Image (cartoon, rainbow, N blue to C red):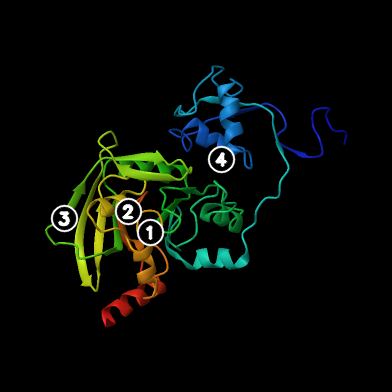
Amino acid sequence: MTKSPSQTASETVVSPRVQQHIIDDERAGQRLDNYLISQLKGVPKTLVYRIIRKGEVRINKGRTKPDYRLKEGDTVRIPPVRVANKATPKAGKRLTESIEASILYEDERIIVINKPSGLAVHGGSGINLGLIEALRDARPDQKYLELVHRLDRDTSGCLMIAKKRSALRDLHEQIRNDRVNKVYWALVEGRWANRKQQVNAPLKKNTLQSGERVVRVDPEGKPSLTRFRVLEPLKGSTLIEATPVTGRTHQIRVHALHAGHSIIGDDKYTPREVNMAFREQGIKRLFLHAAALEINLPGSGKRQRFNAPLPEELEQGLKALRNE
């Protein structure tokens, strides 16, 4: 087959010609940028936003913006797209088996996974492969798999994956209307007072001169509220339960720090000497775990709670502290 003059051996044609997609009920309500990312597999997000900005993507023959919410019956024009060849990362057998073994619940609409610490929920920012990419790789026949929400890379525990667009819409609506309850367990330095039951402090993202991104309490930040409860006082530390009312980046970590008790193992917000002291007790990672999640099941509406047991390494760390 003869190559077109504009196609080189170092390029892959993702979309060989203009495509016209008609949006059905399953995709209605999705943002345009997220829809294109799901359709143009392997295309960098920067390129997706570029073709939208240049007007090459059209909705009902008109230009639009990345955050446009698709409507049932919309016609989406997708231009021809080529990207440079690069090896597509593949999930190893050990990783896929680990993810499958971590599934707490699954039906025809959702999956709830007890995410391991150290595994990013998605690729990007120097990470080739995240949990969602590994799951898609392990289940090639599953047409739709999308993250409902996110957990930090080093946080373990309950994570939801939608298997249908309608389930994703349902769960996002529940999140917006405060019908999803999330409970985290964290080990913090020092003795947390029982009377300290919530932190209500606005949070703002910042970028340091080094390029590192951090979150800080700032009057100009977004309103943020976390409720706390003491579970168990331990030597030099406290096991607490945290329930975020809002859902800001690093919210629990920064609110705990603001309360004067940073989370053990947090290499971004906790002093190094504190982390080193607890490493001797076997706590070598961020002690933050999404222990429980309560939702209305998409489809049935039945209220259901999922519990993710603490990982073995955190249990062993608690045991060492109790023995002290």
Residue depth check, mark 4 versus mark 2: number of the one nearer the observer: 2
Residue depth check, mark 4 versus mark 3: number of the one nearer the observer: 3
Residue lying farthest bottom?
Answer: 323
- Ranked by sequence position, the earlier of labels 1 and 3 is 3
Residue, disc 1: 266
For the residue marked with disc 3, what is the amino acid?
A: Gln
Q: Which mark is residue 197?
A: 3
Marks 2/3: CA–CA distance: 15 Å
317 or 243, nearer to the observer: 317
Q: Is residue 119 above or below residue 164?
A: below
Query: Contact, CB < 8 Å: mark 2 with mark 1?
Result: yes
Q: Work out which quarter of the rendered image holds the N terminus and state it.
A: top right
Marks 1/3: CA–CA distance: 22 Å
Marks 4/3: CA–CA distance: 41 Å
Residue, disc 2: 253
Residue, disc 4: 38
210 or 282, nearer to the observer: 210
